[in-house]
Image: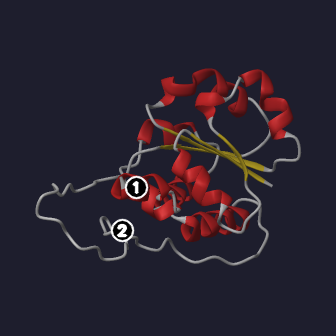
Amino acid sequence: MILLLSTSDTDLLSARTSDTEFRLGNPARLDTADLPELLAGVDLVVVRLLGGRRAWEDGLHALLAGPRPVVVLGGEQVPDAELMECSTVPGGVCAQAHSYLAEGGPGNLGELYLFLSDTVLLTGFGFTAPAAMPIWGQLARPARELDDNVPVVGVLYYRAHQLSGNTAFVHGLCDA
């Protein structure tokens, strides 16, 4: 069992729909006193933090003091060397794990699970490299007649929402 703790809810949404058995949590909403229960039966922990080490210092300290391998990553597109250095697995494993998360989407999160299972837990499932995802895109919507008397507004949103399938709010804005 792999525990994914991420301050990025879109990571958690993608992991939830990835057809894997991640246990999930958001450190921003997690009391460190709840960690022992969350860690029961977990073989490996991945922590992805927006805001650096200080974003969840007590939680990191508790995880790193435990017996499980821990992968610690930043939540940005560019790897966070300070956080990766906290990890208890080799740097190459951290770099590859970061690539899966930075690309995002359920497919990459599923492959992250398989990659970590094989390279750290030695399971032998097999995995593929991170799939490059589009940096930007367009939300597929039915064509509508435009009324010259009504303003047209463009709606921009984070790519991570598109990749995780979290677009209902965008459709709501467009329909308003």
> Where is residue 109, by image quadrant?
bottom right
* Crowd tier of the residue under label 1, counting other residues whose Cα lies within 10 Å: few below 14, some 14–19, many 20 or above: some
Residue 35 percent coordinates (x, y):
78, 30
**Image coords of residue 122 (percent x, y):** 77, 66
Name the amino acid, label 2.
Answer: Leu
Q: Residue at coordinates 42% horizontally, 41% vertically from top-left?
A: 81
Disc 2 element: loop
The reply to whether dot 2 and dot 1 touch (C-beta < 8 Å) is yes
- Horizontal side of residue 58 vs 38, given as left or right: left
Residue 125 as seen in the image, left or right of residue 10: right
Q: Mark 1 points at which residue?
A: 170
What whole-number distance in Å separates the C-alpha atoms at marks 2 and 1?
9 Å
Rendered position, 162 above or below 60: below
Residue flagged by tag 1: what amino acid is it?
Val
Q: Which mark is residue 139?
A: 2
Instruction: Confirm whether residue 18 shows in the render.
Output: yes
Q: Nearer the viewer, residue 15 or 94?
A: 15
